């Protein structure tokens, strides 16, 4: 079956900066596809080329097996990372303007109720909270009842509750058999929403698969955290531990926590401040890229 | 058409609700007009202006009389036009025959004639012209209306588009099926409509506040302002076609407006200035809007009289529009 979207050997250079380096992937219809990566990894560039907003330096984007045509804009819904809305307009007027730009549209009541904008219709755009604003931007992306929805870091800057609400909305949209392409900094978001993810760094794919499959190799692993004042890097190295340094903490990866703790005690290392947690997608990301996500 | 109307309506609402900008666009010209009306209301001229044709040969006592200011003129017709409108009190020529012209309805002309007779000009040939006096306020009013159109169009379109681009709103529109020409025409139509309404408010509002003279047709005046606005908006589109910095846009718009403000004859007549300056003024669209609207209002000019100005404005508009649409970028 032809994938809904295919990206073939995509390259994008800005002068000497190679934002995307020969990246290829395909996105099947009806899934939520996540693009993960640190700042500057090339996620936004990749998604914007796929949306037809940016021209690639080389490579092809195919939608339903064909190059992006003039009708693609009618079939795609796009929410950028940062979009200012027109000032002095209400939510209703903003929605109406975008509604009038498309041939085929989602019925008004359905759109308003799906994005939970009913109580906000007469409110001025500039008086919306962060979460309300994102819901309006999502409604603008859904106004043409698109087949594919692009969301570029849609929950960045939202409080935890607003993020959860936004996730519920995305799940509702996915349940309507829409294809969603999402970029995010948040691993929990990718884990919660995405059926398939690629991890991108320096314009290249470094890992790909379902979140569960990517974690499988590390399933059952535990992270032991100790302050670097208690366990120095030199000692950790001399003990042959697998570890990384994270903001003054040494994070040891182990499949046998009991054995590792026993060895630390033998070295007379204080465990008063010891913390334990399970291996997460974020750890996988750091292990792969050597970078933290939430910069 | 649906997309054009959607963008047009949204922009209109945005402008009307931005009360500070709206108030500024309407009240600024009122303040200027009333200010000039007050400043120039007194008729306390103590200097009599005499237009001299062929100034080099002039060597008579009359010219050196106290309170008589000689103003050299190359063109006889121009000098007589000024005399008709009471901008000169007398025109004098010593070229072939010694002759002078005065306006039959001007008291200053009558007095100057008496002075001329008493200072050796008794045998000069007398000729008269007729014409009503043009107050400075009548003269400057079309200039202020044109000036307001220039500001409203250049900043209203140029600045807003740059702000849209900087904030990412244009990029968002690029993701929709709206075409750049639909967007640009909607911006143009919105500003055109609002500028015409504001100009009418200021024009008729001025009529209620000061007693100005209108010799020509209001419809023709509106046509001048309509074509003038299109020209200024098109110029604004060029400035706003690519840049993303509001500061740079402000600088460029000031660069465009200042020469026009000074050289287009809004505040003072360019008669008597260096010919280079007069020629340079012809490449400025505001000069043509001011000249045409002033001719309609103060001289009752018909469409044939101002056809040249309108043609230049139309040609400039087409050139600006083509360049603006060609170099326009969403992001």
Image (cartoon, rainbow, N blue to C red):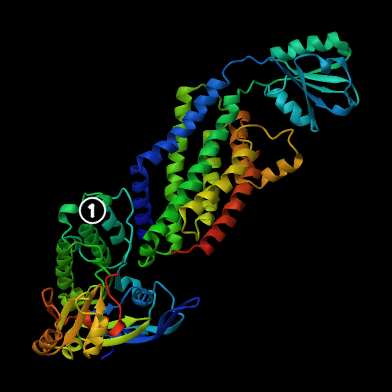
Q: Looking at the image, is A212 positioned above or below residue B281? A: below
Residue B279 position in % (x across, y down)? 72, 44
Residue at 79 percent across and 33 percent down: it is: B75
Is B296 situated left or right of A226 in this image?
right
Mark yes or no: residue A121 visible.
yes
Name the chain under label 1: A
- The residue sitting at the front extreme is A268
Q: Quadrant of the C terminus of chain B?
A: bottom left
Q: Position of residue B107 (x, y in %)?
A: 70, 12
In the drawing, does residue A95 fall left or right of residue B312? left
**What residue sits 51% from the left and 61% below the top?**
B325
Q: Is residue B212 visible?
A: no
Residue B253 is situated, as x and y percent measured from the top left of the image, at: 53, 49
* Above or below A188: residue B171: above
Residue at the left extreme, as displayed: A258
* Residue that badge 1 annotates: A128
Q: Is residue A67 above or below residue B153?
A: below
Mark 1 lies on a secondary structure that is: loop
Residue at left offset 15%, top offset 73%? A171
| Residue B320: quarter of image | bottom right
Front one among A218 and B199: A218
- Please give the count of numbered marks on the rendered protein: 1
Relative depth, front residue between B51 and A11: A11
Which quarter of the picture shows residue B139? top right
User: Closest to the observer: A116 or B296?
Assistant: A116
């Amino acid at each position: 079956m032809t994938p809904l979207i295919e990206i073939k050997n995509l390259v994008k250079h800005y002068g000497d900066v190679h934002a995307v380096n020969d990246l290829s992937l395909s996105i099947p219809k009806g899934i939520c596809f996540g693009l993960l990566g640190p700042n500057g990894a090339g996620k936004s560039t990749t998604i914007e080329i796929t949306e037809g907003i940016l021209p690639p330096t080389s490579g092809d984007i195919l939608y339903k097996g064909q190059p992006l045509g003039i009708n693609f804009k009618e079939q795609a819904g796009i929410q950028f990372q940062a979009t200012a809305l027109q000032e002095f307009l209400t939510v209703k007027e903003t929605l109406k303007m975008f509604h009038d730009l498309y041939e085929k549209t989602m019925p008004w009541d359905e759109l308003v109720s799906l994005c939970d904008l009913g109580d906000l219709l007469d409110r001025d755009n500039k008086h919306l909270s962060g979460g309300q604003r994102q819901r309006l931007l999502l409604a603008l992306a859904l106004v043409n009842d698109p087949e594919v929805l692009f969301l570029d870091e849609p929950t960045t800057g939202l409080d935890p509750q607003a993020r959860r609400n936004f996730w519920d909305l995305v799940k509702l949209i996915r349940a309507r058999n829409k294809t969603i392409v999402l970029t995010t900094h948040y691993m929990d978001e990718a884990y919660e929403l995405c059926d398939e993810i690629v991890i991108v760094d320096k314009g290249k794919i470094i890992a790909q698969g379902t979140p569960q499959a990517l974690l499988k190799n590390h399933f059952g692993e535990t992270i032991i955290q100790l302050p670097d004042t208690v366990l120095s890097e030199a000692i950790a190295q001399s003990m042959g531990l697998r570890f990384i340094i994270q903001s003054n903490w040494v994070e040891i990866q182990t499949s046998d926590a009991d054995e590792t703790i026993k060895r630390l005690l033998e070295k007379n290392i204080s465990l008063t401040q010891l913390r334990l947690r399970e291996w997460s997608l974020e750890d996988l990301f750091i292990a792969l890229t050597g970078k933290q996500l939430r910069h | 058409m649906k997309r054009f109307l959607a963008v047009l309506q949204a922009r209109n609402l945005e402008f009307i609700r931005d009360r500070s900008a709206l108030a500024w666009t309407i009240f600024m010209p009122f303040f200027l007009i009333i200010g000039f009306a007050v400043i120039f209301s007194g008729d306390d001229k103590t200097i009599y202006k005499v237009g001299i044709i062929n100034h080099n040969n002039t060597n008579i006592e009359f010219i050196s009389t106290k309170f008589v200011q000689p103003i050299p003129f190359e063109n006889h017709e121009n000098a007589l036009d000024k005399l008709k409108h009471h901008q000169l009190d007398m025109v004098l020529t010593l070229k072939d025959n010694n002759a002078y012209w005065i306006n039959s309805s001007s008291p200053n002309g009558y007095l100057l004639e008496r002075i001329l007779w008493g200072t050796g000009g008794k045998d000069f040939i007398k000729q008269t012209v007729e014409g009503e006096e043009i107050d400075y306020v009548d003269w400057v009013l079309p200039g202020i209306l044109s000036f307001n159109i220039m500001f409203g169009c250049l900043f209203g379109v140029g600045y807003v588009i740059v702000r849209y681009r900087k904030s990412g709103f244009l990029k968002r529109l690029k993701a929709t099926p709206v075409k750049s020409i639909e967007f640009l025409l909607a911006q143009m139509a919105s500003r055109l409509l609002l500028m015409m309404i504001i100009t009418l408010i200021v024009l008729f509002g001025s009529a209620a506040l000061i007693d100005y003279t209108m010799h020509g047709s209001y419809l023709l005046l509106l046509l001048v302002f309509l074509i003038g606005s299109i020209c200024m908006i098109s110029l604004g589109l060029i400035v706003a076609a690519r840049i993303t910095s509001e500061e740079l846009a402000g600088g460029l718009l000031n660069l465009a407006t200042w020469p026009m403000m000074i050289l287009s004859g809004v505040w003072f007549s360019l008669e008597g200035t260096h010919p280079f300056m007069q020629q340079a003024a012809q490449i400025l669209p505001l000069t043509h809007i001011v000249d045409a609207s002033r001719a309609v209002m103060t001289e009752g000019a018909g469409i044939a009289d101002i056809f040249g100005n309108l043609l230049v404005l139309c040609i400039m508009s087409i050139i600006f529009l083509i360049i603006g649409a060609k170099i326009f970028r969403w992001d």
